[in-house]
Image: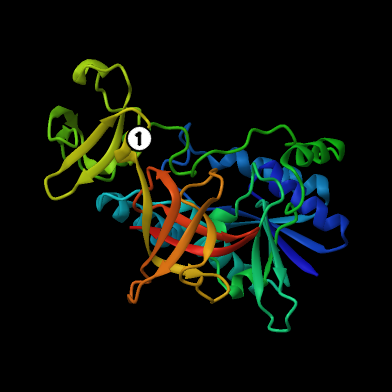
Amino acid sequence: MKVIVGLSGGVDSAVSAWLLKEQGHDVLGIFMKNWEDDDNSEFCSSREDLVDAVSVADHIGIDIEVVNFATEYKDRVFSYFLAEYQAGRTPNPDVLCNTEIKFAAFLDHAMRLGADKIATGHYAGVREVADGTGRFELLKGDDDTKDQSYFLHRLNQAQLSKAMFPLATIPKREVRVIAERVGIPNFAKKDSTGICFIGERPFREFLERYLPKTPGRMVTPEGNDVGTHQGLAYYTLGQRGGLHIGGSRAGSGEPWYVAGKDLKHNTLIVVQGREHPALRRRDVPIVNTHWISGHEPATGERYGAKTRYRQPDAACTYAAADDTRGLAELDFDEGQWAPTPGQYAVVYQGNVCLGGGVIA
């Protein structure tokens, strides 16, 4: 087949491209430029990544094309990112980037170039259901420590049907071994963390460029003042660092955590101790639900779900509500730690990702 691979400059996409070439496919690499603001800064320079991607393509023996999706990214991802923070929620732009850029703008571009499939270096799997319906399932990657199906759970059937994930069954450690063995130049390159437009910079400093400071009270659940916050948008549930409260404020040396936001009164609610009851809840409501196969989980049935990436699936019962917003609820057997509004709760049946929703 003609397969167009998203080459990021990292080792995962490089090995994915090499594997596809070895399998006999006609492979073309695409480097996506998704961010232009301060791209020359120390925090987010795509220049090095492009150099690495070109070196990989040259070594493998495939052509590479550079495509600029910065406008689409700003319109479809970054605007949502800012609006969510402004509303006091904590969005996950990586999920939106997959649905709106990598498997939408990039997929559309690849189809115009005559691609049969697109491929990425995600640790996830896809398979066609053997029932003659032409339906596809999103699967967890075999490497539990790297599974990225969480970030792909909002893809639709059309997107899944065109997707290939060459690393579905390969452990991360083996990917680097393969890369070194076949001489891929970036085999030792450090994995990227976070989203490019933030990079390694202080997160609050970045947000302050786009959202104004709105200082307010920092209080305990009992209403006791313990400090001042700089703006609710700069904090997320479960956050420990950056609160600037000494443990002695309440006669305890335990660290403080963000436990809630009172948007009406511009108040940040904080508690001491990671296991404070205010940081856990069993019932997690979700909205804007999306089910990849088109079939909603059955009310009253048991599933596994996670309320944040890199978290083991937790047993829960699914309950749907008759609501046009796609409202539903996950009732977990055990309290989940700091389910965060704006993040995603993703539902699984074994190793099959069913979809999920935004934590309300």
Asked if residue 244 lies left or right of residue 121, the reply is: left
Up-down: is 287 above or below 343?
below
Q: How is the image coloured?
A: rainbow
User: Which residue does the image show at 26% across and 44% down from the upper left?
Assistant: 233
Give the residue pinned by disc 1: 239
Q: Which of 297 and 123 is in front in this view?
A: 297
Residue 34 drawn at (x, y percent): 50, 53
The quadrant holding residue 5 is bottom right
Residue 12, given in percent of the width and then of the height, sits at 70, 45
- Residue 208 seen from this side: no
Which amino acid lies under the numbered mark 1 shown in the image of this protein?
Gln
Residue 320 is situated, as x and y percent measured from the top left of the image, at: 40, 71
- Residue 134's image quarter? bottom right
Considering depth in this image, is 89 or 43 the residue closer to the camera? Answer: 89
Does dot 1 land on a helix, a strand or a loop? loop
Compared across the picture, whether 217 is left or right of 92 comes to left
Q: Residue 175 sits in which quadrant?
A: top right
Q: Which residue is drawn at 22% across and 16% down?
A: 251
Q: Considering the image in quadrants, where does the N terminus appear? A: bottom right
Which percent across, then down, holds residue 84?
A: 31, 54
Q: Which of 245 and 250 is in front in this view?
A: 250
Let me know if residue 215 appears in the view: yes
Question: 208 above or below 320?
Answer: above
From the image, which quarter does the C terminus lie in? bottom left
Please, is residue 193 above or below residue 129 in the view?
above
Residue displayed at 43% across by 51% down: 92
- How packed is label 1: few (under 14 Cα within 10 Å), some, or many (20 or more)? some
